[in-house]
Image: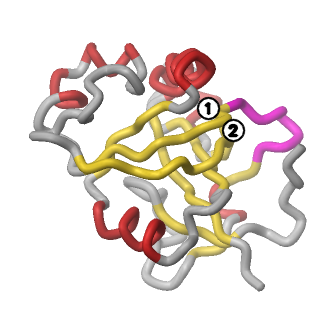
Amino acid sequence: MERLALLAPVPEEHLQDGLNVCATRGKVAFGSGKFDLFNKIDTSGLDQDLPVLIYPSASQNPESLKYKVSWIGTYAGFVNSRMGRHPDGMKFRPPSTKKYPLDNSGHWAIFWHVKDLKTLQVNQQRFISDFGKVKGGWRKNAPPRGPELVSLPSDWLEED
């Protein structure tokens, strides 16, 4: 049976700040406009222990922009935004998002949550091209511009 995961680009500064939010609040929230994808995940039962594979989408470090999954977590549901804001305000949002007014006001349709966020060891990191595209998903010749469902390679690391 095909094992699925959520592959998503997230700016590196939000990931760094998200570590502390996740550790203190139990989860961290990232924004998206892909309501249909997250609704599909939640209504189809895929939300149970769905791995979240994250690659940095913006960074001061050029090495981290090679489209490698270098962060991992577990999907913890989503909430609809309220006029583009998270319904719990900044409680689950990375503080770095305050620098970008649209990140917390009027831009996102939903906020998806990640628990157990952590960085992967260098030897565990994989290029996003190693993950199989799910029908109707992103194109292999361009990185996804938002979260997408992917299939995990058979040799993907087992969680602790």
Please, is residue 88 above or below residue 4 in the view?
above
Q: In the image shown, does 93 or 100 lie closer to the viewer?
A: 93
Where residue 97 appears, x then y in whole percent?
32, 21
Identity, as a three-letter code, of the amino acid under mark 2: Ser
Where on the picture, by quarter, is residue 131?
Answer: bottom right
Where residue 159 appears, x then y in whole percent?
85, 49
Which residue is located at x 29 percent, y 29 percent? 88
User: Tag count in the figure?
Assistant: 2
- Circles 2 and 1: CB atoms closer than 8 Å: yes
Please, is residue 82 above or below residue 149 in the view?
above
Q: Is the image coloured rainbow, by chain, by secondary structure, or in one colour?
A: secondary structure
The local crowd at label 1, few if under 14, some if 14 to 19, many if 20 or more residues have their Cα within 10 Å, is some
* Mark with earlier residue (2, 1): 1
* Residue 123 on the magenta segment: yes
Q: In the image shown, does 24 or 127 lie closer to the viewer?
A: 24
> What are the residue bounds of the magenta stretch?
118-125
* Residue 82 on the magenta segment: no
Please, is residue 76 above or below residue 101 in the view?
below
Q: Give the SS element for disc 1.
A: helix
Check disc 2 and report the residue beneath it.
Answer: 70
Which residue is located at x 63 percent, y 50 percent? 53
Where residue 158 appears, x then y in whole percent?
88, 54
Where residue 103 appears, x then y in whole percent?
24, 30
Check disc 1 and report the residue beneath it.
Answer: 64
Identity, as a three-letter code, of the amino acid under mark 1: Ser
Asked if residue 125 lies left or right of residue 4, the reply is right
Q: Quadrant of the C terminus?
A: top right
- Disc assigned to residue 11: none
